[in-house]
Image (cartoon, helix red, strand yellow):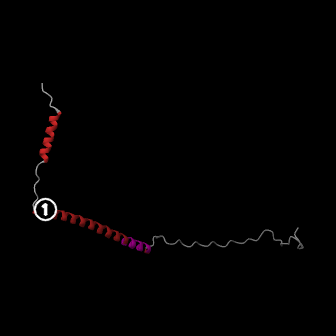
Amino acid sequence: MKKPISHIVILNLVFSLLFSFSCQQQKKETPEERLERIEKAVADKFAKRRAEQMKKCKDNAIKIAEQRVDSILIAQAKLISIDTTGRPIKPIKPDLPEITPPKDSTDVKPLFEEIPDTIQ
């Protein structure tokens, strides 16, 4: 039968592997490589800044163009008459009705003979 490997031995192996990979020396950067890295970083920042400015300029130009187009469309709309049917014709006046005399042809008499002094 196999003997179980103790946990301490396994931990020591894991730590030794990690330690060996972390102790590798990093490559020294030469002045030319450093200058190239700096130039690349500056170029990236410049390109990013330029893209932001172009986007801001484009948005501003679109905003101004929208305002001008809207004002032109409003001015043209004021000049154009939307109602194409025109005014309706003036209605014809009806003929005057015939005046018929009343059936009772007696004269109209006053209701009271005398005007009363006071109203009771």
User: Front-most of 11 and 31?
Assistant: 11
Please provide percent x and percent y for residue 24: 11, 49
Q: Is residue 73 left or right of residue 107?
A: left
**Which image quadrant: the N terminus?**
top left
Q: How many marks?
A: 1
The C terminus is located in which quarter?
bottom right
Residue 77 within the magenta-colored segment of the rendering: yes
Question: Percent from the top left, x then y, of residue 95?
Answer: 64, 72
Q: Residues within 10 Å of mark 1 (few under 14, many from 20)?
A: few
Could you say which quadrant of the image residue 94 lies in? Answer: bottom right
x, y (%) of residue 13? 13, 38
Residue at 13 percent of width and 41 percent of height: 16
Q: 82 and 13: which one is in front?
A: 13
Q: Give the range drawn in magenta.
A: 68-78
Q: Is residue 107 magenta?
A: no
Residue at left offset 11%, top offset 45%? 20
Residue 62 image offset from top left, x and y in percent: 32, 68
* Residue extending farthest top: 1
What amino acid does circle 1 point to? Arg
Nearer the observer, 82 or 46: 46
Which residue corresponds to mark 1? 34
Q: Is the magenta stretch mostly helix, strand or loop?
A: helix
Q: In this orientation, which residue lies closer to the viewer: 8 or 30?
A: 8
Query: Which quadrant of the view contains residue 35?
Result: bottom left
Indicate the secondary structure of the residue bearing disc 1: helix
